[in-house]
Image: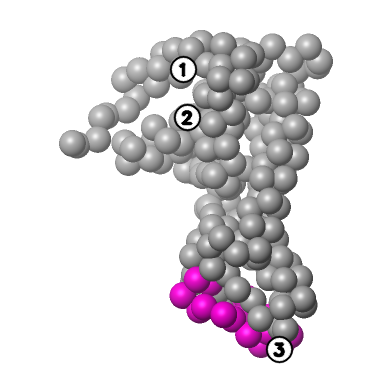
Amino acid sequence: MPNDLVADECVAAMACIFDAAGVSIADRDAVGSAAAACKGSPYFLQLLGRASLESASISDDLADFRAGGPLMAAFAEGVQARYLRVWRDVQAKGLGPCARQLGALWRRLEASGELMDAEWIDRAISSGLRHSSHSGAKMSLEGAARHFRHLGLLWSPSGDSLRPWDLGLPSFFDYVESLYRNPARIALRASLPTLEADMESLIEGGFSDPEP
């Protein structure tokens, strides 16, 4: 499945599976909202599909995607577990600050209407590597970028390494931002001003403020 899978395509894919499995849907309008929660990620689509079929197996072959129900609660738990596993992975390799900077860059570019390219990606990752306090062996810029691609967190829609890039899962980077701004995460929170100042110095003159 493509990385930029949209909600309508998710719904169509799941409908085929439900029909084959003899599963009914309690509220069809809720399926689109549930699919949108996948954020375009094939992994999360699989997670949602698995949660729906497991739920239907104990609910008279009925899949209920409405918010607040057990199906969506199970899906949300799976999403958070995935975020935590990926975060632990990038932290173990000293790439936590890189993830933070990539997310900050993406939000800034999204607001300005500009596209991510290889140069911006390298700047954000370099900033994170420069401010990493990880005591273990540090990755090279190329190794770090390759690892983010391996995790599905960076991808090139065109397949060209020099063309505009995109975040494979923006919601993960929102999760990372929430960790950095969590008062309980003292070390992360303490490093945030330095990372923000470094990002500003990197992008100075490279962005135009969006029209109000």
Helix, strand or loop at mark 2: helix
For the point 44% across and 12% down, which residue is it? Answer: 197
Disc 1 target residue: 196
The magenta segment: 13-31
Q: Are marks 2 and 1 in contact (CB under 8 Å)?
A: yes
Q: Gap between marks 2 and 3, in whole Å? A: 44 Å
Q: Residues within 10 Å of mark 1 (few under 14, many from 20)?
A: some
Q: Position of residue 122 (x, y in %)?
A: 56, 27
Can see residue 118? no
Q: Residues within 10 Å of mark 2 (few under 14, many from 20)?
A: many
Q: Position of residue 163 (x, y in %)?
A: 49, 43
Q: Is residue 163 above or below residue 57?
A: above
Helix, strand or loop at mark 1: helix
Q: Amino acid at mark 2?
A: Ala
Disc 3 target residue: 22
For the point 66% across and 63% down, which residue is it? Answer: 70
Q: Point out the image quarter for the N terminus.
A: bottom right
Q: Amino acid at mark 3?
A: Gly
Q: Are marks 2 and 3 in contact (CB under 8 Å)?
A: no
Classify residue 161 by image quadrant: top right
Q: Are marks 3 and 1 in contact (CB under 8 Å)?
A: no
* Discs 3/1, front: 3
Whether residue 144 sits left or right of residue 66 in the image: it is right
Disc 2 target residue: 104
